[in-house]
Image (cartoon, rainbow, N blue to C red):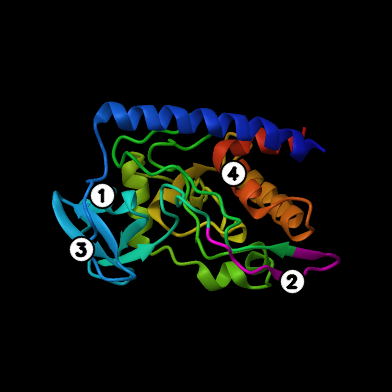
Amino acid sequence: MRLKVLLLLCLCAAGFAVALALGGAHADGVASPQRASACSSGYVDAIIGGEHKCLHAGEFCAVQYEADYERYGFSCLNGRLQFFAAPAPPTTAPTEPTATVSSTSTTTTSTVADTYRPLPRTKTLRCRVHGGLPDSACTPGAVFVDVTAATVCTPGFSASVRNVPASEKRAVYAEYGTRKHRRGQYEADHLISLELGGSNAIANLWPEAARPRPGFHEKDSLENSLHAEVCGGSMTLADAQRVIATDWLTAYKMVHP
């Protein structure tokens, strides 16, 4: 019951955040060019560094254009493009077949389209933690778009997709101005956890402190609770992703008053 009430609160907050973000994008004058695509099928028509590019996962990339790549749903990791959730939903939702998988005690039905779409990352420097929450402009969250509830409920899924190289962790700490820290003081944490379909993109990472509590240890317990709700069929994967990306602290305090 607490999680259902929380969802109503978070959904309202998320809608307000979207309205603010859209208003800010208009004010900045950032808009996609209106022209016919010149890219082959399977490639994304984009403007990178002021030049037209055709993007595809696995292609070579330049890290200085990370903000441009992320507008089109990509991240530049180790010199190669990695695809994660696109910043805006498609104009028409594709029809996907349902997939049914058995968890420990119940059956979960999900579709590929059951995925939360975070806002795009708009800042890469001078990021700041606000009351235990990441800077939403630097860390709005990012998800694997082809992951379903059936996928995340498969044993071993999180371990199979975990891939955050040391260079990416250093970049995360640098963005938040964390130059030195003791072992165990911080964790380069996934805002939307891997067990909820969160990706390894830098837009989904931030240096989370252990203290003051609740810190990253407590967030881990919330992630486990949400994962159990998803796999038990009482919450959709998209709603669980939205809850933890919007305000995980409020969610934790409602589950652990």
Asked whether the viewer can see residue 167, the reply is yes
For marks 4 and 2 on the same chain, the one whose residue lies earlier in the sequence: 2
> Residue, x 38% and y 41% (percent of image)?
138
Q: What percent of the width, then of the height, locates residue 58?
A: 31, 72
The residue carrying mark 3 is 38
The residue carrying mark 1 is 68
Is residue 135 rendered to the left or right of residue 193? left
Q: What percent of the width, then of the height, locates residue 30?
A: 25, 37
Amino acid type, label 4: Arg
For marks 3 and 4 on the same chain, the one whose residue lies earlier in the sequence: 3
For marks 2 and 3 on the same chain, the one whose residue lies earlier in the sequence: 3
Against 126, residue 210 (above or below) is below
The Cα atoms of the two marked residues, 3 and 4, are separated by 34 Å
Is residue 25 rendered to the left or right of residue 130? left
The residue carrying mark 4 is 242
Residue stretch rendered in magenta on the structure: 94-108
Against 68, residue 15 (above or below) is above
Assign the magenta stretch its main secondary structure: loop
Against 179, residue 76 (above or below) is below
The Cα atoms of the two marked residues, 3 and 1, are separated by 18 Å
